Every structure is written in C-alpha cells, then in structure tokens.
Amino acid sequence: MKDRRNMAKLWGGRFKARTNPAFEYFSSSISCDYKLAEYDIRASRAHARMLKKIRILSATELRAILKGLDTIEKTLGKFAQGFVSRKYEDIHSFIESELVRIAGPSAKKIHTARSRNDQVNQAVRMYCKDAAFNVIRHLSALQLSILRQARRNEHVAIAGYTHLQKAQPILVSHQFLSYIEALERSKNQIEDCLGRIDVLTLGSGALAGSTIAIDREAVRKELGFASVSGNSLDSVGSRDFMSELAFALAQLGVTLSRVAEDFLIGQIEELSWYEIPEELCTGSSMMPQKRNPDFLELARGASAILIGNSTALLALQKGLPGSYNRDLQWDKEPLFASVEITTQILHLFRVFFDGLKVNAANAKKSLQSDSLCATDVAELLVQKGVAFRVAHETVGQFVLACAERKMALRAAPPTTLESFFGKNAAAVRGLLDPEASVRHKKSVGSTSPAEVRKQINRWERALSNASIQI
Ligand code: ARG
C-alpha cells in the first residue's frame, strides 16, 4: 500500500517509496518559481485553447479549465505561506493539481503534449520578456532624469580627471551626457536579447515533441511570440537567453557602479561638488553627525551580485548534456534576483538624479589649477606649426619650471614665457584660463558648449518618444 503522506505529485504512479522529506524540501522550487505563476497560467490558457482546437478537449472541458485557471489566478495570495514553506514541488505542478481540484477530471487533460520541461522554459521566457521591456522603460526614464540635470548644469565647468588626477576642464553636462550614452548601449543590448527570448518553446514536450499533431502556431499567436522554436531538444535545454539577459544586467550594473563612484568621490566634504538627496542617505548608529551616501554604495556593491548571478547562470549550463537536466532548476534565483536588483537601482538612481544638486561654486574651485590647460597650450603650438611631440615636451618643461617655483602657469613672468614659447608667448598666456578651456574645444563629441548643446538636442529628440510608463 502506498504511503500517501507525500506532497501531491504529478509523477507518483511509478513510485513505491515516499520521498525523503528533506529531499522534498531541497528539491522544491516553489519558494522562488511562484513568481512565474501568471506566466504559467497564461501559457496554460493558450495551450488549453489549442487542445480544444485539435479536439483533445471539448468546449465544456475547456470552459471548466479556463474558469479554474481564472480562480487560481485570483486566489494565488492564499497560498503564499505554502509557497514559502515549499509545500508544493513547483509552480507548474501546483497549478495543475489545483486545477484538477477546482475544475474536476477535465483538468486531467491539460498536460497533454506538454512537459514541465517546455512549460518552465516558456514561462521563464515570458518573465524575461516582461523584465526586459520593464528595464528598458526604467532606463529611458533614468536617461530623461539625467538629461534634465545636464540641461540644468549645461554651462557649469569642472575639472575632469584621469587616474584620479586632474586632467582637463569639462562641462558637468558633458559628464552627465556620458552616462546617458552608456545607458543607451545597455538598452540596445537588452533590446537585442529580446530577439532571442521572444520564441515559443511550449509544445516541445519533455524533449522529443509529441505524437499528437498539436498546433504550435496557434499558441504562438495567442501568446504573442515572434517565432516558434525549431528543435524540441534545444528548446527544453536552452538557457542561453537567460545568461545573455543576466550579462546585460551585469554590464548595466557595472556601468551604474561607475556612475555611483563618480558621485561618491565628488560628494566628499573636501570637494563638495554635489549635494546628494538626503532621502537616499542614512545616519550612523554611533556618530551623530554622520550622513552617509548609502544608496550610492549599495548600488556600487550591487554590481558584484549582478556579476555573480551572470557567472552562476553560465556555470550552471557548462558541460550539461543536451535537453533538460534538473540542474537547470537553479537558474531562476539568480535571474530573478538580477532583474529585481536592477529595477530597484534604476528607480532609485532616478530619484537620485531628480534630487541631485550641483554646487557650481565648488565646481569652479576645482578649476583653480591652470595646468589643466597644458594640453590646450600644446595644441596651440601644433597649430603654429610645431610637431605635437615637441610641443608636449616644451609644455612639460614649462609646467615643471613653474611647479619648481611653486607658481601658477599664468604667474610666469613674460621673459619665462618667451624663453619657452618665443613669439607664441602671448597666445599661450591667453590660453591659461581653465574656465574658458571648454570653449576652445572643436572636435565632434567634445566638451565644447556647442557640441554639448548638440548632444542635449539629440537626446531630447531621441527620448521624446521613449515609453517610460513603469
Ligand atoms: N521545477 C523545475 C525547474 O524549474 C521544472 C520541472 C522539471 N522537472 C522535471 N522533473 N523534469 O526546472
């Protein structure tokens, strides 16, 4: 006599022994994959309608099934506790057994020509599709918020750094626009992933398809996928679309970690270029005076998790034989975590940029050192016919001479200037104004006010039609 204490199973027929309870708990995925419920239900509806079309289900049976699925959808909240405590094996078997309980024996036909292997692949694809569109909308909203800041600070010049050393003056707006540019690449990357995500894999069965002539095209149409998968074996084993999306999110996280770092540096008291929104800061439990930029640090740190999740998804697939293997059940936790973390960060970065204040007076202070103009001087000499390498050497020696005398370049007496630059001395002297430096830039994509204005106009146009409904 069978021991019936086990959790309800779709595959109990062949078994005599009860499943080890610790293994039952370990192998359950419902505490995570309950997030696929709405997708599984939607796919089940399409599958059921198709089964009616090919006369596996009668109209009455289909009605009972659709009604049952509606009820399950509405009452999912009731089962939250059972999901957390892993009372069920996974969301797919939970929905099927609930359906049989609610809709009666007709629901026992729902699994015709279907396996959890194609079901889970399909549901995850639907999740990824929604997630990708959602992240894209968040990205557009964030870009718009950054663009507003670029406009607000269009003419504020500040010292630009390389190697954390003062390099050349730039416009703060140019810096903000650089973020928009990088975020656009993430958006394109995610849009590109969508091409590989947007495929109907349901109807692939366990691995080999079905002896029943199911109508996959009808299911594709109802679910709104771009194409029907061409190989059942590949369909049930494919997770590359997931690792690809997870990588795109990891890259986005890394980009945002760099944005966070720019502001973490710029907000230190000694620089105080930026005032970051207090609603994104926290205090110290011991030091009463503290106001810490925790959001930026958490966002910077989150990229570690996003990188880890992307790596975990790749590692999970490595060396697996083709088709479905249970290892793949571990795919959802990293994927869901990456999507959830990314959407939260994108939302909060928007709050950040909406509330950010640039302190123009302190930005100006960063321009005190006129060696920021050294490259402009070298380029001036080039335009007077001097070879760049020679000009570089001459300006370098001039900078060294001034540094040794602890004086600004513009404080050099005319005789010194003439000894280095001859007849160009006056022109050189005229260039030693860091605040004016950006105005001398001429190349496309440079930080000159005219080029920055072009960028602002371009992004205004590009983002005016972007959907940002979140
Ligand atoms: N819960 C599984 C997963 O997420 C799907 C079920 C496949 N199980 C199986 N025994 N074929 O991957």
Image (spheres, helix red, strand yellow):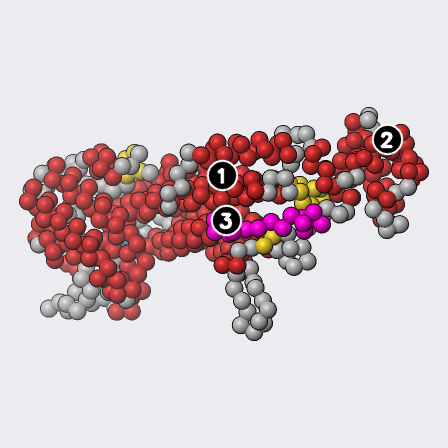
The residue that disc 1 covers is 184
Kindly report the distance in space between the C-alpha atoms of the residues bearing marks 1 and 3.
19 Å
Judged left or right of residue 4, residue 27 is right
Point 59% across, 43% down: residue: 153
Q: Which mark is residue 424?
A: 2
Please state which amino acid type lies under the numbered disc 2: Asn
Please state which amino acid type lies under the numbered disc 3: Asp
Point 24% across, 59% down: residue: 77
Label 2 element class: helix
Judged left or right of residue 141, residue 18 is left
Ligand 1 within 8 Å of disc 1? The answer is no
- The span shown in magenta is 349-366
Point 55% across, 69% down: residue: 284
The residue that disc 3 covers is 354
| Residue 171 appearing in the image | yes
Q: Residue 326: x, y in percent?
A: 31, 54
Please state which amino acid type lies under the numbered disc 1: Glu
Q: Residue 142: x, y in percent?
A: 47, 45
**Which numbered disc, 1 or 3, marks the residue that appears first in the sequence?**
1
Foreground: 260 or 83?
260
Kindly report the distance in space between the C-alpha atoms of the residues bearing marks 3 and 2.
46 Å
Q: Main secondary structure of the magenta part?
A: helix
Q: Is residue 360 a member of the stretch shown in magenta?
A: yes
Kindly report the distance in space between the C-alpha atoms of the residues bearing marks 2 and 1.
43 Å
